[in-house]
Image (cartoon, helix red, strand yellow):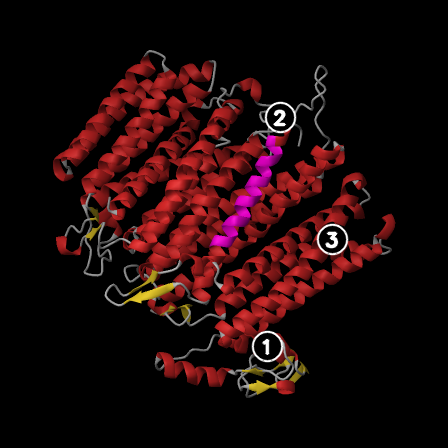
Amino acid sequence: MNELLDPLILSRWQFGLTTIYHFLFVPLTIGLAVTVAIFQTAWVRTDKEKYLQLTRFFGKIFLINFAMGVVTGIVQEFQFGMNWSDYSRFVGDVFGAPLALEGLLAFFLEATFIGLWIFGWDRLPKKLHLASIWIAALGSVLSAYFIIAANAFMQNPVGFRINEVKGRAELTDIWALLTNKVALAAFPHTIFACFMVTAGLIIAAAAWHLSRNQHLETMRPALKFGLWMMVIAGGLTVLTGDQLGLAMVETQPMKMAAAEALYNTSTGAAASFSIFTLGTPDGTSELFSIRIPYLLSFLSTHTFDGTVEGINDLQAQYVQAYGPGDYTPTVWITYWAFRWMIALGLLHVLIAVAGLWLTRKGRDPKWRWMWRVAVWAFPLSLGAMIVGWIFTEMGRQPWIVFSLLKTSDAVSPGISGLDVLISLIAFTAVYGTLAVVEFRLIKKAIQKGPEAAPEPDPETGELQHTATVY
Amino acid sequence: MDLTILWFCIVGFLFVGYFVLDGFDFGVGMSLPFLGKDDTDRRVLINTIGPVWDLNETWVIVAGAALFAAFPEWYATLFSGFYLPLLLILIALILRGVSFEYRHQRPEKAWKARFDRMIVVGSAVPAFLWGVAFANIVQGVALDANHDYTGSVFDLLNPYALLGGLTTLLLFFTHGVVFVSLKTDGDIRARARTLATRSGAVTIVVAATFLVWTTLAYGSLLSAVFALVAAVALVVSFLANLRGREGAAFALMAGTIGFAVLSLFASLFPDVMPASNDAANSLTIENASSSAYTLQIMSWVALIFLPLILAYQGFTYWIFRKRVTRAHIPVEAAH
């Protein structure tokens, strides 16, 4: 019973669940804002109705998704203080700054201009209305930078000193904090992955309609747009993921060792990458595995004869440096999360390349099951994103701030297990219910398809937009 | 000026902004059962705040982040100490926010009614609990030597705090109803004015009691002056509403809420979270604040960006300055 009511374990579950849930909506907020802005730009420049229809079609999905992103985002900020007050006391001087910058520079911009965009169809001049969606998109991308810089401090603390008297980390160099090498690599990796998820949604929506032979005028260009977006964003996600991997090996070698379940330090051919391992990957009971020699060496060091440190050696080093304790993440989670991220990511690029080939020069794929595969592009790309975050956060354990503060020392001392159990149940119930409603509404909006553009005013010839009123 | 004082003022300013702005959103939400006779009325009401509720709510995110960055100890003590009330506020804000977006997605009456109820509850709960929370901060709570809250959730529900909650609930309700009279036309505008007179009378009595209690028990000279300004503004707002001066009534309600919040902050100073059990455990602007370097960086950012933020938010309010009428609400399309 006591273990059930451990505020640490419950708080970790709560933070994990609420963060994953929040991040279901973040990629579409970022990616669809840009998508809608691109279609609207195309409409303003060409005056073609199909682009206006696409703007409004994806705009509607964007809004249903955006509301959830906003309200679940507040929970994220409050939780640091509510559940992790000792963490907040320890890092607030450093970690609070990017959060405040995010609010002042990005959130206000995003919230204000999205309001202008939704309700401004009939009140703003055409170009100003277009500018407002671009500014909102800029705000969302900017906010991603600040929050990833904050997260990068937890992975690779820089730009700070420890104030022994106050027992906390203090910021000494804001520029170092904002140009943390982990942030510089993780930001483009995350943004491009967000575009992959968005591309997944666009492909799925277009495939659903095209397989029913409807809305061809709009959904053909949408499919092409989505496929190219997936290929380009996918390629860039791979490239930036490689850079992030190098930064990770340098700053958190244990995370890479745990990603590969590599127990002993290996060099060259022995530093192989296992695609599949049967048996518990704890290094003692491996029954069967498919391995690519040299690949881990190459991923970690960009050379074929590099040395990759293993868990056992790192564990010994960390005991020397930080005192007795277990410094190994939960290996089966990191091992499989890392593989699923890569596998699902590559699968999507393949689907998109195949899609481009099959639909070249206005062709249709021969078999209907191909459309169904395309529809699955959306949930699976979201899955790739989620396991990526699970990998990077679980791979940091047992630290909440690598080398400075352990997760077990970060939880609020004043809260009881019962408090957290109540909140965990409340969030699970509310989030679960809303997930069902949200999924149905987005599905309904997609299946309804693009609507005809508004009628022009008989006198001025201007389109009579009505704002999407509540 | 000492930067900790500057940041105490900035945090105060952000909370003033939040309560003045989201305050009327809460009021509009709570007024649905009183002013929304039919679905068109209710859509008029919701659309008066449609373009702005999200940016208004953003003020609390920024206020929270500013608290985190400038006074990490205050943020940590407050948010972990008031765990369950904040949980309720979060759940309420979630339900309110999604309801605005969801209620018009389907035409069925039951569907709309469900989300209307969630808007009412999602507005009333934070309107009440923010008052409870701030009254407790002013009154002081039990803190240990590490500044962690040692009381229970029931200690937070004391008479002074409950009166504080009732005060913010009524202030926001009246604020929202006055906003409706300013932003609508026709029948609903007239009914809003009548309702504002009734709720305004009750609000004056409750808010005056709370401000006098605050001033006598926890006040300073400055907080007393702010409380007096708030009280006068509230009474004049009431009179302006009676005479049909909707713009003035609304501006004065904003002034009332702003100065009431300032009065609470002034009575705290130089503490930010007084310990009721032992003054040595109190959090002050000195022992709760971030380092001078962090505050310096943050000050530059705030001083450059806050005017810009006020400018573009002002622009939004100007763009949507027109009254919302029943004629603006399109007839329900067949879904």
Residue drawn at the location 68% of the way across and 52% of the way down: A199
Q: Is residue B1 left or right of residue B34?
A: left
Q: Which mark is residue A301?
A: 1
Q: Chain of mark 3?
A: A
Which callout, 3 or 2, points at the residue further toward the start of the chain?
A: 3
Same chain shared by disc 3 and disc 2:
yes
Task: Please determine if labels 2 and 1 lie on a single subunit.
Answer: yes
**How much space separates mark 3 and mark 2, taking CA atoms?**
32 Å
Question: In this orientation, which residue lies closer to the viewer: A439 or A229?
Answer: A229
Q: Nearer the viewer, mark 3 or mark 2?
A: 3
Q: Nearer the viewer, residue A449 or A46?
A: A46
- The residue singled out by tag 2 in the image is A466
- Mark 3 vs mark 1, foreground winner is 1
Q: Main secondary structure of the magenta part?
A: helix
Of the numbered discs 2 and 1, the one sitting upstream in the chain is 1
Residue at label 3? A228
Residue at mark 2 to residue at mark 1: CA–CA distance? 57 Å
Q: Amino acid at mark 1?
A: Thr
Q: Residues within 10 Å of mark 2 (few under 14, many from 20)?
A: some
Residue type beneath disc 2: Thr
Among numbered discs 3 and 1, the one appearing first in the sequence: 3
Residue A391 located within the stretch drawn in magenta? no
- Give me the disc on residue A235: none
Tell me what residue is drawn at x 51 percent, y 58 percent: A20
Cβ–Cβ below 8 Å for labels 3 and 1? no
Left or right: residue A278 versus residue B100 is right
Q: Could you tell me which residue is drawn at 46 percent across and 34 percent down?
A: B53
From which residue to which does the magenta span run? A128-146
Contact flag, marks 3 and 2 (Cβ < 8 Å): no
Q: Quadrant of residue A334?
A: bottom right
Percent of width and height locating residue A207:
76, 49
Q: Whole-percent x and y of residue B162?
A: 24, 39
